[in-house]
């Protein structure tokens, strides 16, 4: 099951996909983009109209992996554990990247791993 971690973009604790889960999710996201483009062209509709039907398989997979329903493919793309850094020693929120030198949440300076 995915690990819960604070997402600085969503501003809440959410399940993050580990690399094994991401290996399943990435192709589903890529396929969803292809389906959305095809659906929009065939039905002459905007993105928001195409997303629920064409993104369904990716949304369903994310829910099976994490237990949480998501409605944004972009959010799923950034809910990948490997994109985040270690927890801040001062506030405990994850650094925005593995190489971050500053905690964006509290401003505490950090020495990134070499």
Image (cartoon, rainbow, N blue to C red):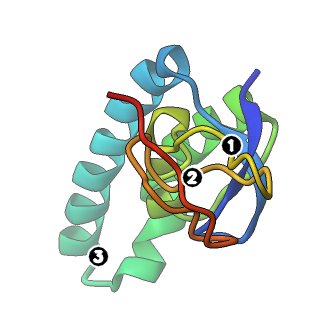
Q: How many marks?
A: 3
Rendered position, 81 above or below 71: above
Q: Nearer the viewer, residue 97 or 54?
A: 97
Question: Which quadrant of the view contains residue 64?
Answer: top right
Q: Which residue is mark 2?
A: 95
Q: Which residue is mark 3?
A: 43
User: How far, Cα to Cα, is label 3 from label 1?
Assistant: 45 Å
Q: Dots 3 and 1: beta carbons under 8 Å?
A: no
Q: In the image, which is nearer the foreground, mark 2 or mark 3? A: 2
Q: Is residue 65 left or right of residue 23?
A: right
- Dot 2: what SS? loop
**Percent coordinates x, y for residue 1 in the rendering:** 76, 21
Q: Which residue is mark 1?
A: 87
| Residue 3 tag number | none
Q: Is residue 73 left or right of residue 93?
A: left
User: How far, Cα to Cα, is label 2 from label 1?
Assistant: 6 Å
**Percent coordinates x, y for residue 70 in the rendering:** 67, 56
Q: Is residue 29 left or right of residue 67?
A: left
Identify the mark nearer the N-term, 2 or 1: 1
User: How far, Cα to Cα, is label 2 from label 3?
Assistant: 42 Å
- Dot 1: what SS? loop
- Dot 3: what SS? helix
**Percent coordinates x, y for residue 28 in the rendering:** 40, 35
Q: Dots 2 and 1: beta carbons under 8 Å?
A: yes
Q: Nearer the viewer, residue 14 or 47?
A: 14
Q: Is residue 85 left or right of residue 99?
A: right
């Amino acid at each position: 099951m995915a690990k819960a971690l604070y997402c600085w973009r969503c501003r809440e604790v959410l399940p993050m996909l580990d690399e094994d889960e991401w290996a399943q999710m990435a192709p589903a996201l890529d396929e969803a983009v292809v389906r959305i483009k095809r659906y929009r062209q065939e039905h002459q509709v905007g993105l928001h109209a195409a997303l629920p039907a064409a993104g369904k398989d990716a949304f369903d997979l994310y829910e099976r992996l994490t237990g949480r329903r998501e409605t944004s493919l972009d959010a799923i793309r950034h809910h990948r554990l490997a994109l985040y850094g270690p927890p801040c020693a001062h506030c405990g929120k994850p650094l925005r990247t593995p190489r971050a030198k500053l905690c964006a949440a509290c401003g505490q300076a950090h020495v990134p791993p070499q």
